[in-house]
Amino acid sequence: MINQMREIENKIENGSRLNEADALYLFESPDLMRIGALADRVNRRKNQDRIFYNINRHINPTNICALSCKFCAFSRKPGEEGAYAYEIDEMVEKARTAVAQGATELHMVGGLHPRWPFKRYLDMIATMHAEFPGVHLKAFTAVELDWMARRERRSLAEILQDLKNAGLGSLPGGGAEIFHPEIRDEICDTKVSADQWIDTHRLAHSMGLRSNCTMLYGHIERFEHRVDHMRRLRELQDETGGFNVFIPLSFQPNQNDMGIGRYTFGFDDLKTIAVARLYLDNFANIKAYWVMLGQDIAQLGLSFGANDFDGTVTEEKISLMAGGRSGMAMSRADLENLILRAGRTPVERDTLYKPINLEKSLAQVAQGNQSHQASRSHQANRNLPVSRARKMTFAITPHTVVVKLDEMKNLSWANLLTTCQSNSSTPSSNGPCEVILAGMSVVANLMEQAAVDLHAGMTALRAAGVRRLAESPSDARWNTHDKVHRAAHQADLPTTGRLTLRATANGCDWNDFRKQLDRVSDGLRPLGMTAISLGTSPDVGDSGDSGDAHDALSMVVTATEYLHAVSQLRFAAGERATIITSLMDDVPTLAPAMGLGSDGSQHPAQKLVPLLADFGSDDLGLVDPALIKVQRLIEDIRSAGLAADVKFAPESSQTDAGLDLRHKPRDRA
């Protein structure tokens, strides 16, 4: 297995083409970091550190559709609740607003309306082109074009030529789904076949119309089906060179007829982007489509082979109705902010991937503010983890209780002991609860006020049921940690240190974080500390009322920055220390910042779980089953080839048989 990976690396370095067996091996390998680093190296050869984005507007003309694809949550039948069909004038007004904001592209795809003649689509393009002659019109999937041709009883070439004459600029890549008949017949048997989709794009390329291509993954397909799909696209690209970009589309689980109720694994999302970059060697552009991946995974994808972040979008209803939680719009400032904070250079493009004002973009980056420059420099020189965690641990409420002293008012030493005793004696299926006391400065102050010796106080806390003492966010600027840690250890009470990565207006305070890392190397390990948690803090200038939800993106730590901080912490702490990245309290996601929250399928931070291990974490802290489904969390962990170590979980949840995504469909539960 190791030799095969080396052979693949040698092929990449020598410019040799990977075969299908190589691609399948990469999909099956758990070594995401090695594969990602290889994909990043290939991407930088092609695109340097430049990441494309565009100012665009999605308009979905109708969701009324004659087809009934099992995976689709967007389509409706005529008269069904939620069905809609825009008039052309309505579409023009939507486009007018976007063009006034700088949009260079209008992206139009929708359902197969049973009552719309071809003239309706032709008028749609002609009107848009007349109103906005300088805007590129990317419209109509191969499925829609086939529908138009069959209804008109005309050839596909004639339909395409009429649309091109009316102003059509290129084709989107939708409708590809998965080409292999074993899967295609199951999820969308009424759509055009794989050969028809390929032939449509071949024809468009021969007529001078470029197109995108996609792959819908994360439903019932297997890795070999993905490889087959990408092989067919690579072959057509060899033949015509007409594809602009490859776009992996992660399956969105809401309202489908396949019984699938979960989002894709973040580990799988990044692996798919990386494999695409390595296998699709004749594609210049691989997209991390934030609308479906979410801003967090899409930003991380820029370090795993993607060079395109898509655009401002606005009102993309197809993924939203299927359960997309990333919102339908991002501003230019947000896009550039996320790209810069991934350590890359944002470059605006047009639909055909020609840079717009490239010199201006590069000049702005060169003059960038100190926060962005510090972030870029930090990430360019980051240390990798000492070693990948082999298992991921987490505890479950109510078997473990964290008493957060920062949130408690009017507390006395006597009350604290009573509180700890009460929590520790709470019955559970596994006996007494484990109590973790968070807030060292509060503990020390309460002991001082009660004239209690530190060692005696720690002994009393242990007798009251406390099993660990942890630093809290309020301890960040407290300077007497060491003596409290030592007193706790003398009383046989383990302690957890805490570091905080702080956001600034346009990045993170890496200088402050490095000072905290010095304390880890010089002070915490000699104290005998067994665990260190990593928290985040928003920009201190934030009053808590940002007004616009998008403003929050410049005030929080992004997932990319957090993971790099985890790797720095692991390097400083060494292999023996436990690194805690609390899934519910500390792991940052942009979903809440965009006005979104968790749902019954997956907490917003859950996609990042397997990646945390690759960057050096091995503990997810305390998990509340009311917000995070424990079994699905275990599946996320196992998807990356890790063991799941669940403290105080029922035995049925602790079995570690693993998920075999190579040889069977994804669990549909």
Image: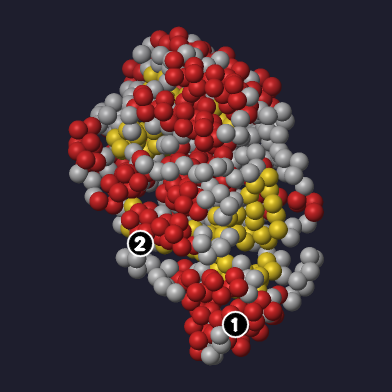
Horizontal arrangement in the rendering, residue 244 relative to residue 635 (left or right) = left
Q: What element carries label 1?
A: helix
Residue 632 is situated, as x and y percent measured from the top left of the image, at 67, 48
> Residue flagged by tag 1: what amino acid is it?
Gly
Residue 528 is situated, as x and y percent measured from the top left of the image, at 56, 63
Residue 587 is situated, as x and y percent measured from the top left of the image, at 51, 55
User: Is 101 situated above or below 280?
Assistant: below
Q: Which of the two labelled residues, at mark 2 and mark 1, occupies the earlier sequence position?
A: 1
User: Is 146 situated above or below 567?
Assistant: above
Residue at point 58% right, 80% down?
455
Residue 475 is situated, as x and y percent measured from the top left of the image, at 45, 71
Per the rendering, the mark at residue 182 is none
Q: In which quarter of the image is residue 434?
A: bottom right
Per the rendering, the mark at residue 539 is 2
Q: Name the residue under label 1.
A: 457
User: Is 260 situated above or below 171?
Assistant: below
Residue at point 30% right, 49% down?
374
What is the distance, in whole Å, between disc 2 and disc 1 at their CAs? 36 Å
Towards the viewer: 401 or 505: 401
User: Can residue 558 be seen in the rendering of this structure?
Assistant: yes
Q: Quadrant of residue 6?
A: top right
Q: Is mark 2 on a helix, strand or loop?
A: loop
**Local crowd size for mark 2, using a 10 Å CA cut-off: few (<14), some (14–19), many (≥20):** many
State how many labels appear.
2
Residue at point 64% right, 79% down?
459
> Residue flagged by tag 2: what amino acid is it?
Asp
Quarter of the figure with the C terminus = top right
Residue at point 78% right, 57% down?
650
